[in-house]
Image (cartoon, helix red, strand yellow):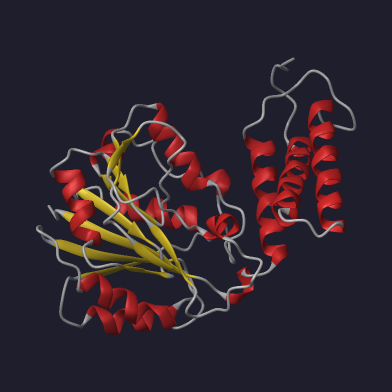
Amino acid sequence: MTTLTVAFCTYKRADRLDKLVAALRAQSCPVPYEILAVNNNSPDNTLSVLADLQKQAGAPLRIVTDNTPGIVPARNRAIDETLNSEVLVFIDDDELPHPGWLAAACDAIINENAECVGGRILIDFSGATRPVWLDDEIAGFLGQLDHGKDAFWILDEKTPIWSGNIAYASKLFRNDPSLRFDTRYNRVGRPLGGGEDQAMFQRLLAQGTRLRYRPEMAIWHGVDNWRLKRRYFLKLHYLAGLRKGLHELPIYSNSFLGAPPFLIRQAMGHVARAFSLWMSRAPGALRQAMNATHALGLIAGYRQRPKDTSPHD
């Protein structure tokens, strides 16, 4: 049995793989580990780059290709491919680990008996130009996460951990074959929207999983320039609202134009506040506009869902 597997899912990022695999092989780890690359049917030269990296010295690199488009099938394929490992660690193909990252993940699972552990995600703007309007709050929606310098047990949704930097005790998935990333939140192509990692986090929290935060488990998350536009954050929130309205909201008995009236009132309030802030050039205009697009997405998603369940008041 392989003791630990580090997995990354990759799509059309062949130019980043040399640095990522080298950084993973440079990690210190008290137990033997392998690297698993899940190629999500990339149309570029990803496979040839991985084949060359496979021949190099260091931790063994295993390559599988999953032909189902999207990050969710790729992550679930990684889970299924690593059921014989004790620990599964995920990192994304646009990230690089800090020294000590893998050792911290291993220590939390093996020595602290955590069943899931995550750490800091720091935004790397070295390959992009950070706009002046992009404050730390908005940057959080690029995946930034930092709960401080102290380790702790996660007990509620206030301190989430995300699947771009996370480790699991593989027994979670061996013991429950239904525990997988939710395919309803799949993302294909450019990763807008999503929600599969939040859904997994909420499910683990609800079932009493031992969740741990370790600050030493830190990674740099690279940011592409195409994300650093106001419209990206607006569309991101619209799609998040749409998926929530489509998959999570109950069916309500009262309806106006295909949506519950309270959702329409909330959306109108958010839109009015966003317009007022924008016209006065006040701080917080973009953040309020993101709230407005999320509210509009909720309505759009709710209107698309089947109405064949019992309504709620």
Q: How many marks?
A: 0
Closer to the camera in the image, 146 or 38: 146
Relative placement, left or right, of 102 versus 3 is: right
Give me the residue at 18% from left, 52% from top. 106
Give me the residue at 82% from left, 57% from top. 278
Residue 86 visible within the image: no
Question: Is 227 placed above or below 170 here?
Answer: below
Residue 13 visible within the image: yes
x, y (%) of residue 191? 57, 62
Closer to the camera in the image, 37 or 32: 32
Q: In which quarter of the image is residue 128?
A: bottom right
Q: Residue furthest right?
A: 257
Question: Is 226 placed above or below 177 here?
Answer: below
Q: In which quarter of the image is residue 201?
A: top left
Quadrant containing the C terminus in the rendered view: top right
Relative placement, left or right, of 125 versus 132 is: left
x, y (%) of residue 130? 58, 74
Relative placement, left or right, of 118 versus 57 is: right
x, y (%) of residue 84? 19, 49
Give me the residue at 46% from left, 54% from top. 73
Closer to the camera in the image, 139 or 304: 139
Relative placement, left or right, of 115 versus 274 is: left
Question: Is 255 placed above or below 201 here?
Answer: above
Closer to the camera in the image, 55 or 231: 231
x, y (%) of residue 110? 15, 45
Q: Quadrant of residue 247?
A: top right
